[in-house]
Amino acid sequence: MTAPSTLKDRIQNADLLARVVPVEEAVKHVTDGNTVAISGFTKSGEPKTFFPALAFHLSRTAPQTRLTLLSGASLSEDVEGPMAPFIRKRGPYMSSSASRRRIHAGEMDFTDVHLSAFARNLMYGFYGDIDVAVVEVSRIRPNGSVILTSSVGISAEALAKAKKIILEVNTSAPDYTGFHDIVVPTVHPHVGWPLPLLNVRDRIGTPYVEFDLGKVVAVVESRTPDHPVPFKAADETDKRIARNVVDFLLSCREEFGWGKRLPPIQSGVGNVANAIIGELYESPFQKIRFWTEVFQDGMLRYVEDDAKFEYASATAVSFSAEGRQRFQQLFERCKERLVLRPMWLSNSPEIISRLFVIAMNTPIEVDIYGHVNSTHIDGSRIVNGLGGSGDFFRNAYLSIVHTPSVRKLKDGRTVSCVMPYVRHIDHTEHDIKCVVTEHGYARNMDIRSPRRRATDIIDNCAHPYFRPLLHAYLDMAGPGDEPRATDMKVLEAWWRDYDAACRAFPQGG
Amino acid sequence: MTAPSTLKDRIQNADLLARVVPVEEAVKHVTDGNTVAISGFTKSGEPKTFFPALAFHLSRTAPQTRLTLLSGASLSEDVEGPMAPFIRKRGPYMSSSASRRRIHAGEMDFTDVHLSAFARNLMYGFYGDIDVAVVEVSRIRPNGSVILTSSVGISAEALAKAKKIILEVNTSAPDYTGFHDIVVPTVHPHVGWPLPLLNVRDRIGTPYVEFDLGKVVAVVESRTPDHPVPFKAADETDKRIARNVVDFLLSCREEFGWGKRLPPIQSGVGNVANAIIGELYESPFQKIRFWTEVFQDGMLRYVEDDAKFEYASATAVSFSAEGRQRFQQLFERCKERLVLRPMWLSNSPEIISRLFVIAMNTPIEVDIYGHVNSTHIDGSRIVNGLGGSGDFFRNAYLSIVHTPSVRKLKDGRTVSCVMPYVRHIDHTEHDIKCVVTEHGYARNMDIRSPRRRATDIIDNCAHPYFRPLLHAYLDMAGPGDEPRATDMKVLEAWWRDYDAACRAFPQGG
């Protein structure tokens, strides 16, 4: 890697170098009512200098300003938090507590869309015009095309679609030249084309983003590195879930004749995901490939092991402080084994299906039939959004939903993550092939009615403490192939018993 | 067309001609515990002679026999009804009242899977071995490969995968040579390939199915034509829904710059679907293309109009008695303008997405946020299955769910098809771009929270009689971006009011 650099090193186009302005000037291009599309995905590659400066500017000069903010996926709280009061509409994913509060209160309109669809809808014009794009880049090439940084997300679509462009050149970021594979979606009535991608490592686009330079109204410098993401070591429950996931995969290897060739893995983000990545490393599988959204801490050890690892494709790298150091040491090696693509491509149903990807994600809760709530607490209040979980679950060769069987809430109750029904459904029983908890796994791949699957999910996945209550629901719910209790009095009694059980959950249970 | 023919005309391979046996002999190849995969899709191309004969044979000689039955989609009651007592497991779609009763009672295990996924899972081995394939064909070519009849469904996969094959040569069917485009899915660890299909009319496979002739244990003759599907003329409500759908499409044409080029249309089956096909015919759109599951009565008039119509792709033709006559008259013309493909291809997410297909389907009910119940009455009892609705809704350019705003039940109540929540969700709010009833349409394409979309759906789509009740639910449901009432007492009161309203629905309202 080659950081730190000067602005002159990084801006090799004289015309654009002449458009460098202080960030306090650049922010004036964003005005009330604008739709702003920015770079950033899981806190990586976001405009870390421009956005806080814009919030400061608006709070002093135009506090009534309201914007529409579109990003790849989540931004860091440092970037989104100060801007939240000025955002009227937001999509397609966020993990900012400031935005969340406003969304729950009805002050910010949030749309929850599959990430692959979002990027395409943006190009189709479903979200109207994009007034301003703000995109972090690591280098501007002599012809004015740009090299992005640690994420791709919707950066290419934002640059293609926006009326005005602001580039944030991050001189503290390494020069990411060679990491990216950029293609933008075709728009009807143009003819769509087959994505000529047959392997995780195939590249089908350009390593840079080209766009209309005439639209660049400002270039600003940033020296702020990506904000690190928290990393918590796997606990015993995480490890047991991971072991059950790998057991399931080993049984499939046997049954479906994979040989040593594990299909490419999509992994969510978080402790369980990292535990699974760790457990896979210890498994007999070789030449592992990741086709996923985010390349993260747990994957770094793979990069050094040619027997264990073949290649990874993602739309962002996202690390803890420690992980970033390790990434910087492995920068050149990573470049040979990792490609970053636009999120419509990393999450493309066409590719996920063709490559036989194995998808894994953690939900809020799952029901006894395999329906999954990924987004809404009590069915009413969004947490972050569904992100790419639907892109992957729906199109994967195998879709695995993994969760601890119980979760301890702040109010002291311990709730079951396996429920008779979930109050918000983001992924249906039709899309889930396996449910995994620390207690075991339940397959949902055979010719079986939901009623019979339910018994499996309860007996193999639910916490033993909650199993009698779940069976009680099933017993009273009939008739039908997917029985559901509809008598409100009966339901009320069940929920009363359940709440009491949550309160009485044994300590250390 | 060239029917009727003799068996000798239709079996041009001497080896297979020698394997012709009476159907009473052929049925003996199916024995207890077998998995049987058969041709047939929406009552077209099913083994109409073999299956009733098998039911007769089993009822006399081995009534304890239990089988697993896999088909493309629905079979006619004449074919499935007599077999229902012998079916232990069934997938992926049915519309037989005999099977439905057994499924609800827990006597038949039914699995409800996206049709595109089902055909691929079959090839992947997720449903185990296929013991016997029974496939209707219109001709056996000199080299033993076969020409299918009025549907493709899973016929090619069944022939590829089965241990034993029984061919039912239908001499009453026309010779369908030239209608089909056959490809089977790739199985991991083989490399998946991009489907080289850019236009509705492109053909990427063979017009015949090739398979291992050594597996053919019997060839039988059938003289039974496809059982006609009922056809009911559109009523005033259907026509108003159709007009609203076309209004929505016209507004999109304007907004998203389609010009005269309407994206290809997927249309469900039934009265509303036929009304929409009729309304589109009267619309300003030209050179209409259908990318759909079933080519049906309403599309026949298109075939004669070169200005109005370009091409259709489906996995089956399915007609009323009258429609079939017309189809037979137009047989050669249809062959030039219609292609029948395997259902994994007609319902392929890759192609639906690439071609910018506009998807339309009728649900059982939809909720105020756009979640759709396509399968389960009261959330508990399956009607037919989700079929291809998820394949299309999830991957379409625009997904339109259309339904009458109310439905009169046999018990005299009139229920709302727009509900505060639905008790079974097959398609989520994330996948629906527009809800349409006879009262209007509500777009779900912008950056908006579900709470605000709900108001639109209630005010534009719900029946005016039920709107106050739906607003009442929304008012009591907060807080949150997608408010949901969780207090059982409150919910009980709402359902009581709702039930009373259903009973008091004004006659002729």
Image (cartoon, coloured by chain):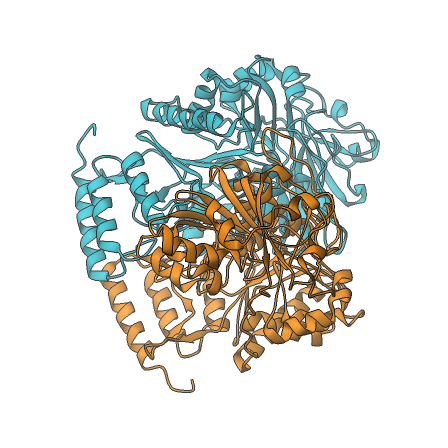
Chain colours: A cyan, B orange
* Residue closest to the eye, A218 or B233: B233
Q: State left or right for residue A143 relative to residue B471.
A: right
Determine whether A383 is above or below A309 in the image. Answer: below
Query: Can you see residue A28?
Result: no
Query: Can you see residue A314?
Result: yes
Determine whether A299 is above or below B168 in the image. Answer: above
Q: State left or right for residue A387 relative to residue A208.
A: left
Determine whether B2 is above or below A101 in the image. Answer: below
Q: Position of residue A427 (x, y in %)?
A: 45, 47
* Residue closest to the eye, A483 or A138: A483
Q: Position of residue B268 (x, y in %)?
A: 57, 64
Q: Residue at x 77, y 52 (%)?
A: A190
* Residue closest to the eye, A265 or B310: B310
Q: Residue at x 45, y 15 (%)?
A: A282
Q: Quadrant of the N terminus of chain B?
A: bottom right
Q: Position of residue B247 (x, y in %)?
A: 64, 72
Q: Quadrant of the C terminus of chain B?
A: bottom left
Occupied quadrant, residue B149: bottom right
Determine whether A261 is above or below A215 in the image. Answer: above
Q: Position of residue A448 (x, y in %)?
A: 38, 45
Q: Residue at x 28, y 77 (%)?
A: B500
**Number of callouts in the render?**
0
Q: State left or right for residue B335 relative to residue B467.
A: right
